[in-house]
Image (spheres, rainbow, N blue to C red):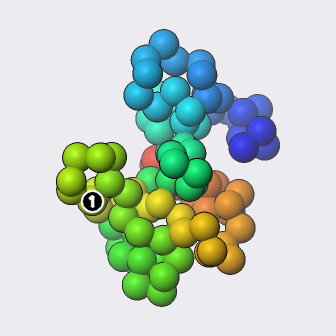
Amino acid sequence: MDRFTGLPDVAPPGSTGGRFGSHALRVRGKIFAMFVRGRLVVKLPKSRVDELVEVGEGIRFDANKGTPMKEWLALAPESELAWHPVAEEAMLFVRG
């Protein structure tokens, strides 16, 4: 994830004071990628999450609240998708 920390408007993990998202990458203050329970979790458009879940690349992320989030994907450990392009896609989505 080091390749993202030098980009404009991107804050590295640990740069915010709060506990939630302390291991997350942020763009303009909004989380776009984080590691949770050993998985890369990224924010993507709902349609893209639906597509990746459908083909088995991951599952909808559930922040231990019992409800999977529509725009958050937890990449499957066995996924063959490269992490950096997925995280970059998430950064571009969140950046708008």
* Residue drawn at the location 62% of the way across and 75% of the way down: 79
* Residue drawn at the location 36% of the way across and 76% of the way down: 50
Please, what secondary structure does the residue beneath circle 1 have?
A: loop
* Residue drawn at the location 53% of the way across and 65% of the way down: 75
Residue type beneath disc 1: Pro
> As drawn, is 91 to the left or to the right of 66?
right
Q: Above or below — where is 59 with respect to 83? A: below
Q: Residue furthest top?
A: 17
Q: Residue furthest bottom?
A: 55
Q: Which residue is mark 1?
A: 68
- Where does the image place residue 86, in percent across and percent down from the top left? 61, 62
- The image quadrant that residue 1 belongs to is top right
> As drawn, is 46 to the left or to the right of 3?
left
Q: Is residue 66 visible?
A: yes
Q: Above or below — where is 17 with respect to 40? A: above
Q: Above or below — where is 59 with respect to 54? A: above
- Where does the image place residue 5, in percent across and percent down from the top left? 72, 33
Q: Dot 1: within a 10 Å radius of its alpha carbon, few (fewer than 14), some, or many (20 or more) residues?
A: some
- The image quadrant that residue 40 belongs to is bottom right
Q: Is residue 92 visible?
A: no
- Where does the image place residue 93, in percent across and percent down from the top left? 48, 54
